[in-house]
Image (tube, grey):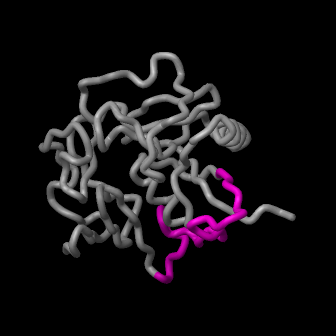
Amino acid sequence: RSFGKFILKFGERYGEDCDSKTTPCKTNNDCTDHRFCSEGYCEDACSSECGNNFCYVKDHIATCFCDPWQRFFKLGCYEQFGFRWPPYRGEAKQYKVEEIKVNWTMAATLCLRRQGRLASLSSSLENDMAKTVISNSGHPNMFWTSGTNGFQQNRWTWVSTKLPLNFTDWNPGHPEVSNVAGAEQCLELQTSGWNAANCGELKYPLCEYYKVPKR
């Protein structure tokens, strides 16, 4: 069922053509609101990660809603993170790696469900902070941030803040200017720097939160 720009879907049963790749695209805007552009074709934003829970989609971003008796059921069904959002004066940003590998769209969703946002790295200081967090996480060196050029080709922005990448730390050879739509349109953080990666790949989300600093 549709509610304005929202598309409500249930579990894995959300349409006969959910797995088909028939509509070509260059950016998310070439797809209907409940789909996103991946490897040149529109794919359904909802994922089986929602299990038998509801999947809510707006502007190409999916959110899983839990059964009230299944608070910890897969993606989006975790207990809410304890920090307030949006930040208030005097609060400090912190980064946290979430313990599940998902695609970029679901990474953005997971951070929102934990009362945070997918990470933005707007300065050298924030970039160094984030690298320290991922280095100490014990996970392989592949982490999603909110950087993407999926909404405007060859123009990278932080989807969490809707601001351009004024600070960058690209690894050599990245980002490539590609004519393959949807190929490498999402920003992956490594300890060596940034890579442009396929948005459909499974990586650990790096979320950002704010907390009141200790006095």
In this view, the residue in front, 186 or 54, is 186
Q: Residue at x 65, y 61 (%)?
A: 210
* Residues rendered magenta in the picture: 68-95
Q: Is residue 62 above or below residue 151?
A: below
- Is 177 part of what is drawn in magenta? no
Q: Is residue 64 left or right of residue 212?
A: left
Across and down, in percent, residue 21 comes to 17, 43
Across and down, in percent, residue 24 comes to 15, 39
Q: Is residue 168 above or below residue 66?
A: above
Q: Is residue 167 left or right of residue 109?
A: right
Image quadrant for the N terminus? bottom left
Q: Quadrant of residue 80?
A: bottom right
- Is 86 part of what is drawn in magenta? yes
Q: Is residue 76 left or right of residue 34?
A: right
Q: Is residue 196 left or right of residue 125?
A: left
Residue positioned most to the right: 215
Q: Residue at x 35, y 57 (%)?
A: 61
Image quadrant for the C terminus? bottom right
Across and down, in percent, residue 192 comes to 62, 25
